[in-house]
Amino acid sequence: MILAHYYQQIPAYCKAKAAFRVPLFLLFFLLPAMAAAPGAAQAGTLQIPQGGVARVEVTIQPGDSAPWGSYRARTVRFAAVSETRFVGLVGVDMQSDPGASPMEVRVLRAGESLILDRFTVEVTPVDFPEQRVEGVPDSKVNLSQENLERAGREKADVQRLWESGAENPLWNDGWIMPVDASPSGRFAHRRVFNGQPRSPHNGEDFPAPEGTPVIAPNEGIVRLAGDRFFGGNTVFLEHGGELFTFYMHLLEVTVTDGQRVHAGDLIGKVGATGRATGPHLHWGGRLGGSRINPLFLVKGAPVYVAGATSEVSVR
Ligand SMILES: [Zn+2]
């Protein structure tokens, strides 16, 4: 099955039901703790696997400002689905420490900052396997001084990109797949090229025939389009609200820097340029500074409905 690999990687989400099988003796300890904190007993928990993205849905009242969230000292931006319904995206880095942190969702109502919900985001661990790749040209594994400097410059360009861009989402809730192909399920695998350990795989691969169209999955602005040492012909898309996606190893890039693209617009064609052993699309994503699997944008994201259980409180 196409998505078998992919779902194997997000066991925490798939196994959500298992969390309810709490041994009775544990409840004995948990219940008094929950009772001791008024309100806490109602607060929900959102589980997100390492490298995952979750959707936080919220309904506001007419006249409220757009909602915003805070999680691990980052602002979570929301996009409007209708006048009063909004969706926010929360990303968890592939190597984020597992564990629980609080998240808040707020609006401005009649000049006051209101907490619509305060809940727990629990990062669940994923056991990403090792991926051994042989037959990579030695020049792409053991870099010459010149290539080392080039790769360093390109990495710095990308770091600057992550810290730039529109604060508010350009994206809407209509994400589509960028290529008509199946994912190989190798997101975040620990890679060993020609026997040498390298950084984890910062995206999902889609093997496809050379020339297969690659399209924008949502609204965006083209950034850093061009040839890169590792990525080959590459396009980055800025989607606003600290969300970026990128497309590597392209045969050709069909867009230019600064170009506004809409979902379905052609941005390039599948190739095998850069550090690649065959034609495929490498699709990566970055959200709020976290390395995320962009497939979660299209399908499989855990959902939390904010404000559904707790009272609105003023802060
Ligand atoms: Zn890849």
Image (cartoon, rainbow, N blue to C red):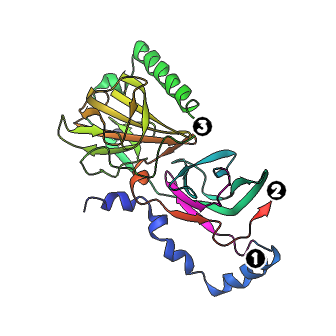
Of mark 1 and mark 3, the one earlier in the sequence is 1
Q: Quadrant of ligand 1?
A: top left
Residue 34, numbered circle: 1
Which residue occupies 64% across, 69% down? 44
Which stretch is magenta? 40-65
Percent from the top left, x then y, of residue 303?
Answer: 52, 63
Is 191 contained in the magenta span? no
Residue situated in front as seen by the camera: 242 or 174: 174
Q: With respect to residue 156, does 237 lie above or below?
A: below
Residue 315, numbered circle: 2
Task: Name the residue type under label 3.
Answer: Glu
Q: Residues within 10 Å of mark 1 (few under 14, many from 20)?
A: some
In this view, which residue lies farthest toward the front? Answer: 63
Element under label 2?
loop
Which residue occupies 25% across, 63% down? 1
Q: Quadrant of the C terminus?
A: bottom right
- Tell me if 107 is positioned left or right of 283 in this view: right
Mark 1 vs mark 2: in front: 2
Residue 167, numbered circle: 3
Q: Residues within 10 Å of mark 2 (few under 14, many from 20)?
A: few
Of mark 1 and mark 2, the one earlier in the sequence is 1
Q: With respect to residue 185, does 261 lie above or below?
A: above
Q: With respect to residue 200, does 234 lie above or below?
A: above
Q: Are marks 2 and 3 in contact (CB under 8 Å)?
A: no
How many angstroms separate mark 2 from mark 3 (CA)? 23 Å
